[in-house]
Amino acid sequence: MSRDYFRVLVVNLATGKGKVVKMDGRDRHLGGSGLAAALFKKYGHVDKAWTEPSQPLIFTIGPLTGYFPLMSKTVCSFKSPYHDQYAESHAGGRSALSLRFAGYDGLVIIGRAPALSCLIIGSRQLELKDVHYMKGIDLQKSGKMLRKMIGGAGHRSILRIGPAGENLLPMACITVDTYRHFGRLGGGAVMGAKNLKAVAILGDGIFDLPEGKTYRNLFEAVYQQLTTTDMMDKYHNLGTPVNVAILNGLKALPIRNLQQTTDPDIEGISGETFANDTLLRNTACAGCPVGCIHIGFVREKFMEPNQYLYRQISYDHEPIFATGSMLGMTNAFKVLAIIDMVEKMGLDVMSAGVALAWATEALARGVISEKETLVPLKFGDADGYKEAILHLGSMSNDFYRLLGQGTMKAVEHYGGEDFACVLGQEMAGYATGEVFFTSQALGFRHSHLDAGGYSYDQKQKDKDPQKAVEFLLKDEQGRVLLTSMVSCLFAREIYKEQLLAECLNCLGYRYLADNMNEVAQHIQKMRWQLRLASGFDPRGVKIPKRFKEIITWKGEIDENYLNTLQKEYGKRIVELGRAEED
C-alpha cells in the first residue's frame, strides 16, 4: 500500500510528451498541499511571470486517497494570475480518485500547446488532442462535446475551462466534472495560457486494498461515523446554504455590496427556500457517502407557446451569497439563473458576484457610467447581471477586462476603493467581524477555508490580538495537515489526529503517523516561504473602509482591534515564512 516516494507524471505540452518521475520526500511532504508546494519548488519559478510557458500547473492527491471516505479532494497549485504569487486551489468531483486509479500522486503540466488542446492521461495513455474548434464555446456545451469525444464514465474525470479561461481572466476557474471547481485565484487562466481547454484523467488502472481485518474494521468505523451519526447531517440536509438565514439573523450576511448585514426579505434565498422550491437531488464527490452537493434547476423557454428546457445547477452558501444577497436578489430561481450564466462563462462565482456588486454601487455613485457597464446594473435585477456576466467572461470592453482581473484592478483605474469588498481577493460570505476580515485579507489563499476566523468571531467575546493570531496560525496548521491528506474539510470533526494516525498506520505510513505535527509545521512554513518569495508582503495589505463601517450583532467594528490584529498576524506570517528549515 505505502510507498516512500511520490509517483508523478510530468507532461510538456509543447512536445506532447510525458514522463513518470519518482520523487523522494513522502515522510516530509505527505501529499496534497505539501506535495504541491514541493513540486512547485522543483518545477516552478518564483521570479518569473505566471504566463511563462515553463511555469507548472500542478495537481496532487494524498496518501489516504481511495482508501478512506471523504479523502476526496485534489490540490491544484500554480502561480496565480490574480497576484502573480504562489497559490493553491482545491476541488473534489472524481479528480482525486481518477488520479489514484491512474497510479499517480501528482500531475505536473508545463509548456504551452501549439493549439487549443485537450490532454488525456491514464495509467498507460498520454494524448494531446487538438480541440481548436471548441474556442469560445461555453463551458456547458464544451462539456458535452468532451464527454462524447473522450468516452467512458465512472472513473473518468474532466477538468475544463470556459471563455473566461481562454481570455486569461484572473477570475477564471477550472470546472471539475460539472459541479465542482478549482474556483479561486485564476487556475482557469493558467490553463488558458497553456492553450489547454481540458484535462481528462482516466482512472483506468487498479490498486490493491490492504488485506486483513484491521483496514476493513477501521474503514467501517469511519463510514459508520459519517453515515449513522448526525455529524454530517448539516451538509447532507440543507447543506451550507443553511448559513444564509443563520448569518442574516446574526447581522453577519454581506448584502448589497456589504451596505447591509441583515434583511427581512432574505428568506427568499435561504437554504430552506432552496430545498423546498428548487432542489432536484443530492450528489457527491467520488469516495464520499455524504452527498453534500445540492442540485437545483433553472427552466428556460426556448419556443412558444410552452416549450421549456431545464438545466441542473449546483448551489452552496458561497454562490448564493455572491450572486444572491450581495446583488440584492431575494428569489432563489433568479439566483440559480445567475449562477447558470457564471458556469457557462467559467468564472469564479465569488469573485464575479462580489465584483459586480462593487460595479453596481460604483454606477449608482457616478464613479463609473453605463458607458463602462453597458448594462444599467441595479441591485435585484437578475437579467442585468446575467448580461453583465456575459460581458465579463467575454471581456466586452476595457472596463470588463479590468474588472475580470479583480475588483482592485478596476479600482486603480476608476476609483471606489472605499466600498470595494476585497480581502486579498473578493470577500467570502461572512461579515462576522475583525478576526475573519484579518484572516481572509492575509490568509494564504485569501479564503474563508484558510482558518476558522468566522467561527472565532462568533465564539470569542474578548479582544485579545495575540490569542486570536495564535488561533489563526494553529488552526491553519491543522487544516494544512488535512489538505495534505486531501480530506474534505467538512470531515474535520471526524478526522482528528488520532484517527488520521490510525489510518496512516493501517496503510504502512508509520513515520507520518508518529510525526504529523512536525510534518504539518514543515508544510505550513514551506507554503509561506513560497508565497513570500513570489512577492507577497502581508504588511502591505489594505482592508477597505467598507469593512470598518458595518454593524454586526456585536455592534460596530473596532478599528483599533482590527488594525492590531492585522499588524500582529502579518508579523507572524513573515516570521513563519522566514523560519529556517531544519
Image (cartoon, rainbow, N blue to C red):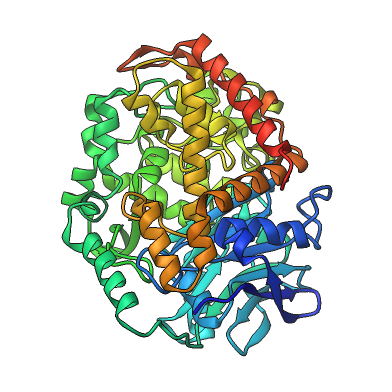
Q: Position of residue 316 (x, y in %)?
A: 34, 49
Does residue 578 sit above or below 512 in this rendering?
A: above
Q: Answer left or right for 417 relative to 531.
A: left
Q: Position of residue 241 (x, y in %)?
A: 29, 44
Indicate the quadrant where residue 214 lies: bottom left
Q: Position of residue 494 (x, y in %)?
A: 31, 54
Q: Residue at x 58, y 84 (%)?
A: 122
**Camera-nearest residue between 224 and 370:** 224
Q: Residue at x 64, y 32 (%)?
A: 573
Q: Is residue 556 visible?
A: yes
Q: Is residue 421 visible?
A: no
> Outermost residue, right direction?
47
Q: Answer left or right for 240 relative to 110.
A: left
Q: Answer left or right for 49 relative to 159.
A: right
Indicate the quadrant where residue 293 lies: bottom left
**Camera-nearest residue between 328 and 37:** 37
Q: Residue at x 33, y 62 (%)?
A: 312
Does residue 554 sit above or below 326 in this rendering?
A: above
So how many labels did they put on this image?
0
Does residue 286 sit above or below 527 in this rendering?
A: below
Q: Answer left or right for 535 relative to 538.
A: right
Q: Position of residue 8 (x, y in %)?
A: 66, 74
Indicate the quadrant where residue 400 lies: top right
**Camera-nearest residue between 422 and 366:** 422
